[in-house]
Image: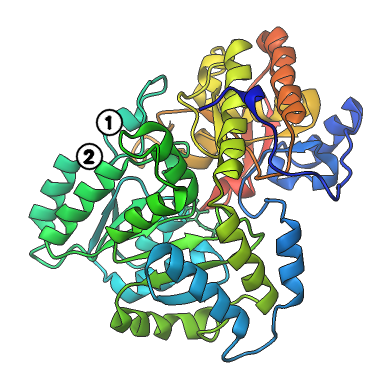
Amino acid sequence: MRPRDAYAEPYRIKMVEPVRQISPEARRLAVERAGYNLFNLSSDDVYIDLLTDSGTAAMSDAQWSALMRGDEAYAGSRSFARLRRVVADITGYEHVAPAHQGRGAEHVLMMTLVRPGQRVPGNMHFDTTTGHIVLRGAEPVNLLRKQGYEVKSEEAFKGDVDLKALRTELEENAAAGRTPFVLMTVTCNSNGGQPVSMANIRQASELAHAYGVPFIFDCARYAENAYFIKMREPGYSQKSIKEIASEMFSYGDGCVMSAKKDGLANMGGFVAFRDEALYHRALEWVIPFEGFATYGGLSGRDMEALAVGLEEALDEAYLEERIGQVAYLADLLVDAGVPIITPAGGHGVYVDAAAFLPHIPQKEFTAQALAVELYLEAGVRGVELGMCAFGTTDPNSGEPIGPALELVRLAVPRRVYTDRHMAFVARAFEGLAARRDSIRGFRLTYEAPVLRHFTARFERI
Ligand SMILES: *Cc1c(COP(=O)(O)O)cnc(C)c1O
């Protein structure tokens, strides 16, 4: 990767959306009103919003123009035809059904292929994917290589699946009809947007096919994954991103995509298959849940913007800027002595809250405390990925059980913020470091039975 000052953003800014930093006192009141849950904040009270990279990209002038040619056809939409051509051109999968977003596509995939009692292996499923597998009465099986779980690492491909474990899983289940498909998530969102190597994709696909099992991609960030392959995997430095993506998809039988990531769209998704018969089975779920086969919950203009965004996301200059900006933020934080997961992934930086605030025990929501303090310090919103998001309760003792890592994710929206915004975030951490000993933990005052992190409320200890 070239140094950050060897190039500049490959675009000019044509339109701006004002943001403002409200006063420290206003932030204190806002976060108190929010029950110390940053999901409850009004975006007007956030200065730099690093909550998610999903649906938060800035569209290009070409995308905004494309909105105007969107049609309003229920059936036979030409906007869908354009989207279908682009998806087929990139993936090689000719049979495409649109969906309102990634989880809509996942719902269709799981209803089409998964039966109760089956097991769905993959490198590491995203949480909505896990949810849809479980809702289907099946079991998600994460077979990430153990290197993928290490906090500090020099590993180039921490998203790789453990091939030996995958072979065992298939050996024990495929012949008995318990494996509907293998799902490869690129990049691997759940361990930090870590890339999967082409070699691993090829071998995992060969294994799946040897056992007669389809190989499917969860390809929300496939373009970022392709860029990492180009940068890090021998033999790919001279290939275009499009060529790398084509090779990758050639090993699969279909994909689901949340287009809110590498589609550079604010909403949308799709499912695509090589096999026409499978597509027709999928339509039985697309039509009642998403919409007719040629819109699937999207308006014509959404599909037009997505068709353009999918191609823009393959541009290497864009990807260098994108991945480079995340790496730049990671470097600034490391220089400031902030413990983070290394190497940085494609879509954000993950701060190790347990190492940053070692005096706050996990059961007092260490990462939540850090996320709240970051907001109070500077108006920057990250997201807790720790005890609140992933914690469970021991059914016998009633004691809380925490996940292995207490993290705050700083997700970087695509084409939205400049490096000065990143520098500002890093500086906010310096302020936090100076007063870290006075930061206190939280206790829950409200929690929902499922996905509690979205609606939980807290009070300070
Ligand atoms: C975001 C995401 C999804 C779900 O997509 P939505 O558009 O949020 O419904 C599924 N898989 C991965 C890997 C994701 O990052």
C-alpha gap between disc 2 and disc 1? 8 Å
- Mark 1: give few (<14), some (14-19) or many (20+) Cα within 10 Å: few
Residue for badge 2? 162
Q: Position of residue 174 (x, y in %)?
A: 12, 61
Q: Nearer the viewer, residue 7 or 129?
A: 7
Is residue 296 at all visible to an observer of this figure?
A: no
Q: Residue 239's mark?
A: none
- The local secondary structure at tag 2 comes to loop
Q: Are marks 2 and 1 in contact (CB under 8 Å)?
A: yes
Q: Relative to 180, does residue 53 appear above or below in the rendering? A: above
Q: What amino acid is at disc 1? A: Lys
Residue 370 image-quadrant placement:
top right
Residue plotted at (64% across, 38% down): 412
Give the residue at x 60% y 39%.
Answer: 322
Q: Is residue 347 left or right of residue 144?
A: right
Mark 2 or mark 1, earlier in chain: 1
Q: Quadrant of residue 24?
A: top right
Image check: 261 left or right of 50?
Answer: left
Residue, disc 1: 146
Q: Position of residue 196 (x, y in %)?
A: 35, 41
Q: How many marks?
A: 2
Indicate yes or no: mark 1 CB to ligand 1 under 8 Å: no
Pick the residue in front: 25 or 398. 25
Determine the residue positioned at 76% across, 64% down: 64
Which secondary structure lies at badge 1?
helix
